[in-house]
Image (cartoon, helix red, strand yellow):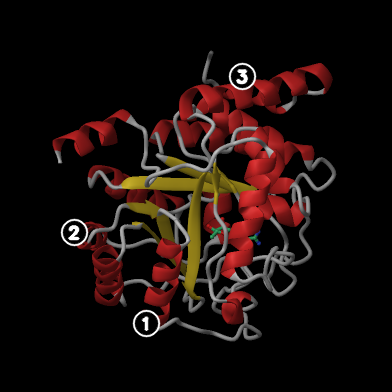
Amino acid sequence: MEYTRLFALKLLQSEGRALERLYSNADTVRRKKMGDDVFIRGIVEFSNVCSNNCLYCGIRASNRNVRRYSMTTEEIMEAAIAMEENNFSTIVLQSGEIRDIKDDEIGEIIRKIKKKTSLAVTVSVGNRRKETYSFWRDCGMDRYFLRFETSDAELFNRLHPGCTLKERLTCLDDLHDLEIQTGSGFMIGLPGEKLETLADNILLCRKFDFDMIGIGPFIPHPETPLGNSPNAYSDNPELFFKALAVLRLFNPEAHIPATTAFDAVFPGEGRTLALQRGANIFMPNNTPVKYREDYLLYPGKPGVDEDPEQCLSSAVVRIKSLGRPLGKGPGHSIKKRHREKRSRE
Ligand code: 5AD
């Protein structure tokens, strides 16, 4: 298999029989490399306070309609302990981004979760200094999740006032240097994106050799500057799944989640289809219901009124309906560098 832009583009344009083959190849590669297990990771959106103004995001700083919240350490611990009781193996702590503050608080939360539970901890709070990532790793952080959003530098810089693609990629390099398991990814169909951009996004994931790659369709949020900008592939939503399948073929050993945005575009089935076209991870929402509506990065986010237990049980029903077992254990990266590290520990 050639991992070139040209080949990615060709695959992204598959139709008819070729498209069926693309999906079945992605599913086969997923099964061969990652097995049939679907790992469940619970996300806790612990704060929507954000100082950034990303043009696409519903919780951007300038959106005055958002009621801002930050969960207390006790609330986060309560969520973590409930997750442990429900057999989750990973907690993903996500929030808006405010640089250089709360480093100690977040470190303390990581320490507490690691002390009181056996959960693996993933953190996703944006661009930080290398020292901060290193400090959190020393507190017990297992993984970090930071999407590069788009590989087109000009587009990235336009969408992220005060942040450049170069800075974002430096953060990802720092995480790699620190040997922290790193997840990244991008949005599919940002306004102004071309099919070449999509191919380059997939190639960039391969170049960085990410441990986890989360991608999902861009969905315009009415309270943002891109509210009236349709997804670049709005007339061709099949491309969302094509992107996922090509991503799997180009990144055979990465964990790939069936992200919530797929369900926002294909209600009730997007994530299930994603699991059949390359994905192997499911991330039910574990944010307390009272905060859900305040963490709307995009409209139509499913499950805003489902409590964590309902989110989990509907995930389990979906996974079982595919005849796939639930992953046991933490579901760490299977990449060689991490396997070797764990065997040294
Ligand atoms: N549509 C789809 N995904 C979005 N995200 C933020 N805003 C949107 C949107 N309008 C994604 C970004 C971010 C992740 C947490 O949510 O990719 O990294």
Give the residue at x 66% y 33%.
277
Circle 3 is placed at which residue position? 7
Ligand 1 positioned in quadrant: bottom right
Looking at the picture, does residue 270 appear above or below residue 301? above
**Mark found first going from the N terminus, 3 or 1:** 3
Circle 2 is placed at which residue position? 138
Q: Outermost residue toward the top?
A: 1
Give the residue at x 27% y 33%.
339
280 on left or right of 224: left
In what element is the residue under mark 2?
helix
Say which quarter of the image contains residue 122. Answer: bottom left
Q: Amino acid at mark 1?
A: Glu
- Labels in figure, total: 3
164 on left or right of 263: left
**Mark found first going from the N terminus, 1 or 2:** 1
Q: Which mark is residue 317?
A: none
* Image x and y of residue 30, in percent: 55, 28
Looking at the picture, does residue 344 appear above or below residue 56? above
* Image x and y of residue 252, in percent: 49, 27
Q: Amino acid at mark 3?
A: Phe
Circle 1 is placed at which residue position? 74
Looking at the picture, does residue 42 appear above or below residue 25? below
Q: Outermost residue toward the front?
A: 85
* Image x and y of residue 251, in percent: 49, 29
In what element is the residue under mark 1?
helix
